[in-house]
Image (cartoon, rainbow, N blue to C red):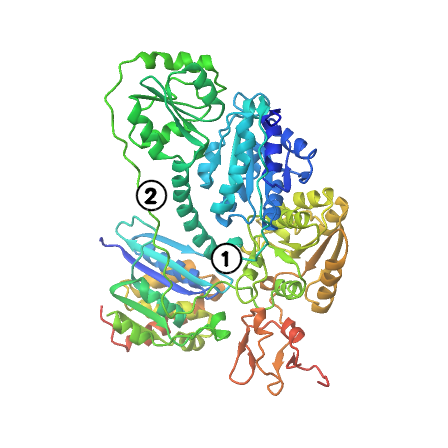
Amino acid sequence: MERQLFFSGNEAIAHGAVRAGVGFACGYPGTPSTEIIEATARLEGIHSEWCVNEKVALETAVGASLAGVRTIVTMKHVGLNVAADPFMTLSLTGVNAGLVIISADDPGMHSSQNEQDNRNYAKFARIPMLEPSSSQEAYDFVAEAFSLSEEFDTPVMLRTTTRISHGRGQVLPRVPVPVEPREYARDISKYVMVPQYARQRNRLVLERLEKLRKRAEASSLNVLEAGSSDFGIIASGVAYTYAREAFPKAWFLKLGMSHPLPYAKVARLYDHVSRVAVVEELDSFFEEQVRALGLPVIGKAVIPTDGELDQEIVFRALEPYVLHKPPRRRRPVMPPAPRLASPPQPAPGLPVRPPVLCPGCSHRSVYSSLRKRRLAPMGDIGCYTLGALPPLLALDSCLCMGASIGMMAGFNKALGRKAAVGVIGDSTFFHSGITPLIDAFYNEVEGMVVILDNRTTAMTGHQGHPGTGLHPDRAQGPQIDIQKLCEGIGVRCVTVDATDHKALDAAIKEEAKAPGLGVLIALAPCVLMTREKAGEVLVDEERCNLCGVCVDLGCPALAPGEDAMSVLETCTGCGLCVEVCRRGALGFAGCEDDR
Amino acid sequence: MNDTTTVSIVGVGGQGVLLGAAVLAATAAGAGLEVKASEVKGMAQRGGSVLSTVRFGEHVWSPVSPHADVVIATELLEGIRGLDLLRSRGTMVCAYTTRITPGSVLRREEDYPDDIAGAAAARGLRLVMVDAEGVALEAGTLRAVNVALLGAASQVLSFTPEQWRSGLEAAVPAKILEVNLRAFELGRAAVASQEVES
């Protein structure tokens, strides 16, 4: 017989993670979640790190998952509020290698500022949730969570409460789960959540949820346990253990995979008993869903909504109902699968007109240089996200504001090399790019960050930010110098004039090869603010062979003609096409050269 | 459904679609009607398709409607696309000489369509074609394509010239008001010669 171990739920999760082939664990400390990372740090084969906050931790975890490594990220309940931005959109992108988010809730607020019920987050994000009720289940459910994550291409929430995380119990170790490595494959329409791709992904999420509900119906984690009375109880987590002890003769629907709720299994409980109660700590999460099936249920009318439960509270609350004369049975009304809106049908034969980077936009120059390097550009949110669309295809990911740097950090850490680059705008950097940069420095990430500094919040219409010091009434306030800020953290940082294509390309090339962490600020004010024409670009029709190298820049001011390219009047003369042309067919008016 | 009139203005980011909608809204409000308007403008300056909708009547409930009585298109391709927005026997007022080529056409992945007359006729829609660029240039600036089209559309909408003038004065910045008043009058005159059923 295998040696039994005696683990807290948190230790069990850590050991369960190693058993499930997890290679990367990160989080931010918070009671009652903290001991998970402390435990993984003592185990072989798993990289553990503290991140600067839960948002950065989740973004780092996403990067590691994309790189192909099974990853857990841990936090307490309120920590998920901090990580809610990447969390909500991660549901849409899905994962590469499995990704499990461990949320440790604190009913009774033993050491917390509130007692929010994070089961609502699983429903909110439409992702599956597992709730262990013992250390053994905490250990076992990790592997279950990873197989769900990879089979359904979704992050999975593993939700504990204080009594599960800190309670101790015997754990029987199991054989390690064989895990196939998952190569990273670039997939822009899956990982870059610009509206046109996010709409497609959102439909997949809604369809995925109904598939997961079928899985929850069949799952051995959701068990209908026969009793010898006419009384049934629906419960999960530690509340299940209280109810089990209080009512040994009752029938139970024990929910281990508690979201999405298996409606048919709930209805089957009603086939066996005439009185059903839901025993759950905090919100009426199951109760509301059972009531929506049209089924009578005893719940929060008698069981407290606040604080922890225990077997006495449960017994005293429900005991009168066990003896109560049973009501007439009702049949459940199964909700139909939610209807999806008709997908927008583009008019056949009509070219679409997506928004594009403006002629002369300095971001184009950065992208032109980056794509010569073998680096996966993790993107962010702003005008520059448009660079992910054809023909530039310049970004591999866009998850939420500020995600680029954390995702780059997790990706590079997981692969052990400088494989990704973070690309972020100046306003987005101030929004939420500073904390992940601090994190990347603290965690000694090998990586590169490019800050596209166009001196404004361009996409939304040129609002001010701390780097420009401009206020809504255009009054000038103090400015924060991004380079000094980075250097203050301790990060190597250079600023390059992004209108100087040669210098920019050389700087990116150098930084891409440099060891450690570096920031490159590509500085050029937004062309919509300057509206200056730098020069007139002319085409040498003899030399142009329509090879398409300049077309791939996606500049709206360049159009292929019958025999040669033509330059439209919207050209700002930025000269990037002149730079990339290999035949010397593009040049500035008035430039004497001997081509 | 009710007595609410729906006018949609379609075009390309940067063409002044939103200003056109503001003029129409001010005109309708000045005529004593309730007005509601809505637009998707997040990408307005980045060369994407832009749609703005103005609804007016004795009482207007919703700010949007899937079908318009009149569509004003400041660009030909957007006009052809905008035919889908029209209710049956609705009217399209289109700047047929204005073409802004999207990237996929520049890259020769797709073709720019041009037969708006055929497409409108096939659906039984009324079509008012306006050389809005020519009209705007005659008024003094190419940028007045939007208001030139409003002038044309004024022939199919039930406001008086005085009401339109008040709307223009209310919505157009003072320093470009004169040129826009000219563009409006010339656009209105350009359609007067066409047969427009009411």
- Amino acid type, mark 1: Ser
Left or right side of B55 for B46 = right
Residue at 66% from the left image edge and 61% from the top image edge: A374
Left or right side of A8 for B52 = left
Tell me which corner region of the image, top left, top right, bottom left or bottom right, holds residue A397: bottom right
Along the viewing direction, whichever of A97 and B131 lies nearer the viewer: A97
Residue at 29% from the left image edge and 27% from the top image edge: A271
Q: Which residue is mark 2?
A: A337
Q: Is residue B45 visible?
A: yes
Q: Quadrant of the N terminus of chain A?
A: top right
In the rendered image, residue B198, in percent from the top left (x then y), is placed at 22, 68
Along the viewing direction, whichever of A245 and A514 lies nearer the viewer: A245
Report the label total. 2
- SS class, disc 1: helix
- Amino acid type, mark 2: Ala
Tell me which corner region of the image, top left, top right, bottom left or bottom right, holds residue A257: top left
Q: Which residue is mark 1?
A: A189
- SS class, disc 2: loop
In the rendered image, residue A357, in percent from the top left (x then y), is placed at 55, 64
Along the viewing direction, whichever of A29 and A64 lies nearer the viewer: A64
In the rendered image, residue A268, in percent from the top left (x then y), is placed at 32, 30
